Image (cartoon, rainbow, N blue to C red):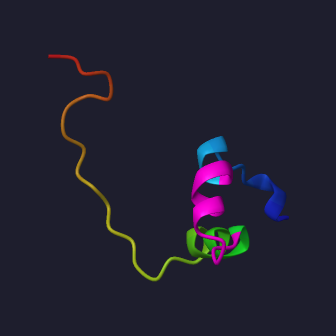
Amino acid sequence: MRNKYTFTAYFENEVLRKRPYLQKDWCIRVIENPIKVELQEKIGSDFGEK
């Protein structure tokens, strides 16, 4: 069931390589079961419109 997640090449090749103690499964568990969630206020546009 965890195959629904994909990781960027940067994460695969840089982050995990530099931090061998991290496990993808841990990252998925955090996303699926957050301790706390803080919604961000949307300010402006996603496309930089003026």
- Of 15 and 42, nearer the camera is 15
Q: Residue furthest bottom?
A: 35
> Which residue is drawn at the image coordinates 63% and 74% (left, top)?
22
- Residue 13: x percent and y percent? 67, 49
Q: Is residue 32 left or right of residue 41?
A: right
Q: Residue at x 59, y 52 (%)?
A: 14
Corner quadrant of residue 43: top left
Magenta stretch contains residue 21:
yes
Q: Residue furthest front?
A: 18
Task: Determine the residue located farthest toward the top in the rendered image.
Answer: 50
Q: Which residues are magenta?
A: 12-23
Tell me the residue at 32%/29% (across/down). 46
Task: Between residue 1 and residue 23, name the one nearer to us.
Answer: 23
- Residue at the spot 58% in from the left edge and 63% down from the top edge: 18
**38 horizontally vs 44: left or right:** right
Q: Is residue 11 magenta?
A: no
48 sits left or right of 27 in the view = left
